[in-house]
Amino acid sequence: MLQLHFVSWNVNGIRAILKKEFVENVRAMAPDIICLQETKAAKEETLAALESLPEYKAYANSSKARKGYSGTAILSKVEPLDVTYDISIEEFDQEGRVIVAEYATYFVVTVYTPNSGEVLSRLDFRQRWDHAFREYMLWLNRRKPVIMCGDFNVAHQPIDLALPKENYNKSAGYTQQEIDGFDRLLNSGFIDSFRHLYPDTVKYSYWNFITNGRAKNVGWRIDHFMVPEKMMKYVHDAYVYDQYHGSDHCPVGLKVTLT
């Protein structure tokens, strides 16, 4: 049995965050595996940036549709058995939003879920994405347990954002359609690890830079670690590492014992 520490972080630009104590912060957290979202760089650029953490094997995905947009990465101290990219559906494979790392007894998935947009212009796309991503996770989970993490771009309950009434059905990340999509993922047999362990704790993982949200703690909890129900008994703790800066998101974490 091995206790593993996983971290997920939307870095809002890998090149930008490298200038903001990113390497020092990763080493302070000391995860076995760290998953990144919104790297905003080509695959080769992301891998070059991550050479500053040579203790990790690095894997990157990037947007094919728009340069400097979206993008994900996984850094792992142990080399995975296999690494795959995207979800094998052309409509959803253009923006580098998913990486799957396979290990002997589990999968790790990093995901940067599409934002529905300022005027909810991508809400229909987002709903189709939620369905397709869930089906892909269920397919993987039939093979071996899936630990999925990332920026899911949804605050699931009123406790998960500072201003629920003001944002409900008006702002991306807190529409009923997005909440329903997250509900379906939970109802498919996955657990929101932090909320399961801390049902009444107010913690946020994202704050709007423009409105100085972090200083006021007017935030959203939209970064999550999800595990299958049968794995929850092996989870020791889940974290929101809001002491770390450098992005408009903070890292979130999970500690679990696996074989």
Image (cartoon, rainbow, N blue to C red):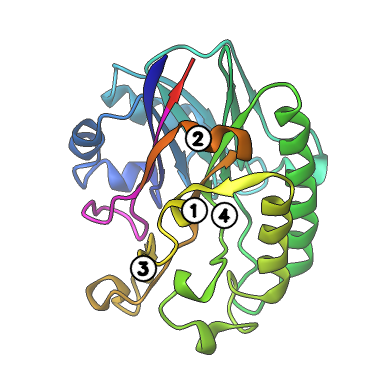
Q: Does the magenta-highlighted stretch encompass residue 98?
A: no
Q: Does the magenta-highlighted stretch encompass residue 249?
A: yes
The percent coordinates of residue 1 (x first, y second) are 42, 14
Q: Residues within 10 Å of mark 4 (few under 14, many from 20)?
A: many
Q: Residues within 10 Å of mark 2 (few under 14, many from 20)?
A: few
Q: State which quadrant residue 7 falls in.
A: top left
Q: Which mark is residue 152?
A: 4
Q: Which residues are magenta?
A: 239-256
Q: Is residue 114 above or below residue 30?
A: below
Q: Regarding mark 2 in the picture, which secondary structure is present there? A: helix
Give the mark, 3 or 1, whose residue is nearer the N terminus.
1
Give the mark, 1 or 4, whose residue is nearer the N terminus.
4
Q: Nearer the viewer, mark 3 or mark 4?
A: 3
Q: Which residue is mark 3?
A: 202
Under mark 3, the amino acid is: Val
Q: Is residue 145 above or below residue 129?
A: above
Q: Which mark is residue 233?
A: 2
Q: Is residue 39 left or right of residue 140?
A: left
Q: Is residue 36 left or right of residue 240?
A: right
Q: Which residue is mark 1?
A: 196
